[in-house]
Each structure stands twice: as C-alpha cells, then as structure tokens.
Amino acid sequence: MTIKQGVPKTYLNHSNQWKLKALLEVLFKNPDPNQITEELSVFFKKHPIPMDDFPQLSGTYSRTILFRNDNGYEAMAACWSPGTTSSIHGHPKFALIIVTQGRLGVDYYKKKGDQVVKTKSQFLSEFQFFSDIGKNETFDNHIHKVHAYEETLSIHISSDDAAKGEIFK
C-alpha cells in the first residue's frame, strides 16, 4: 500500500461517520463503559471503517479525532504502519481499543514506585478489544505500550483527551 500523509481523505464525510457520531452522542451522554464497549463492537462489525481513508505515515501512526463530547469523552482512529511501537503511556479513567483491521500487540504495565513493570501481553486481531475502567481520575490508568505487527486501524475511546496520558520511560 502507498503511504499517504495529511488529513483523512474521505472518512469525515463517509456515511458511517454520521452513524458513528449519532451512536457516540447517545453513548457519551451518560457513559456506561460496558455499554460503550458492547455497542461499538457491534457497530464496527456492521459498519466497517476503511483504513485507506486515514493518513498512513511510514514508521509511526496517525491519530484522527472522530468525535469529542462536551463531557470529555472522545473517539479517535489510529492508523498504524507495520513495526510501529508506541511509548509506554497511561490513559484517563476509561479506555477502549478496538482493532478494526490488522493486528496489534499490547504490553500492560503497573506502576511500582516511580518505575513501571510489565505485567502481561495480549494480541488484538480484527474486532478484538481491550477495555478497562481505572480507579483514578488521573492520566496514569491502563498503562500500556502498543506494537503494530501489520498495517492496522484501531479505534480508541477514552473518557478524556487521550493525548494527556502520562508517558513512562
């Protein structure tokens, strides 16, 4: 596939974008993490999102905000090039990652003093997901690192701007 740079080419005007926005508006109004996970898993199976509609950056990943609610909840698409690895990072209280195309590996970590220690690893293939509710309103919940084993599109839902997540060495 040719690597494309820039803004999403068509998805923000894609018919499924409006269906997704309508669903997210309902789900984010009174957020129930279990309902969000269940309904979005079903939605993405019924309404595929084309990876080609998102920027594909060589050696890294692109982030495209799909929807952000007034209460802070957001939906973001990440388009990963093969071999890309994220930093070890945390998230706000609620986090959900759904792989819609491709395959990711996720390494999970726990804080131990001012260090982080790897606790487990998981592979996520098409329509598999990770979802968790943290204990704190801070940005050090769900500490993990993501590896893209192939070209991958994943959707990330969080209870606040995920870019505020704490980065760990």
Image: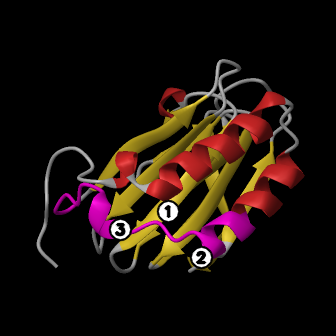
Extreme residue toward the front, this view: 15
Work out how far the residue at label 3 is from the one at label 2, CA to CA, in angstroms.
17 Å
Please state, as top left, top right, bottom left or bottom right, where the N terminus lies in the image: bottom left
> Can you tell which of label 3 and label 1 is closer to the viewer?
3
Which residue is at a point 28% across and 67% down the rendered structure image? 52
| Along the viewing direction, whichever of 163 and 110 lies nearer the viewer | 163
Residue at the spot of label 1: 154
**Lateral position of residue 22 relative to residue 84, left or right:** right
Circle 1 crowding by C-alpha within 10 Å: few under 14, some 14–19, many from 20? many
Q: What residue is rendered at 59% in x and 42% in y?
A: 21
**Of callouts 1 and 2, the N-terminal one:** 2
Q: Residues within 10 Å of mark 3 (few under 14, many from 20)?
A: many
Specify which label sits upstream in the sequence, 3 or 1. Answer: 3
Label drawn at residue 124: 2
| Circle 1 or circle 2, nearest the eye | 1
Q: Is disc 2 placed on a helix, strand or loop?
A: strand
User: Does the residue at mark 3 contact the one at mark 2 (Cβ under 8 Å)?
Assistant: no
Q: In the drawing, does residue 147 fall left or right of residue 33?
A: left
Residue 169 visible in the picture: no
Disc 3/disc 1 C-alpha distance (Å): 9 Å
Name the residue at 88% across, 42% down. 32
Q: Say few, some or many: other residues with alpha carbon within 10 Å of mark 2 (under 14 / 14 to 19 / 20 or more).
A: many
Amino acid under disc 1: Ser
Residue appearing at x 40%, y 55% in the figure: 14
Question: Where is residue 141, by image quadrant?
Answer: top right
Residue 38 image position (x, y, % from top left): 82, 62
Q: Which residues are magenta?
A: 41-59
Cβ atoms at labels 3 and 1 below 8 Å apart: no
- Residue located beneath label 3 in the image: 51
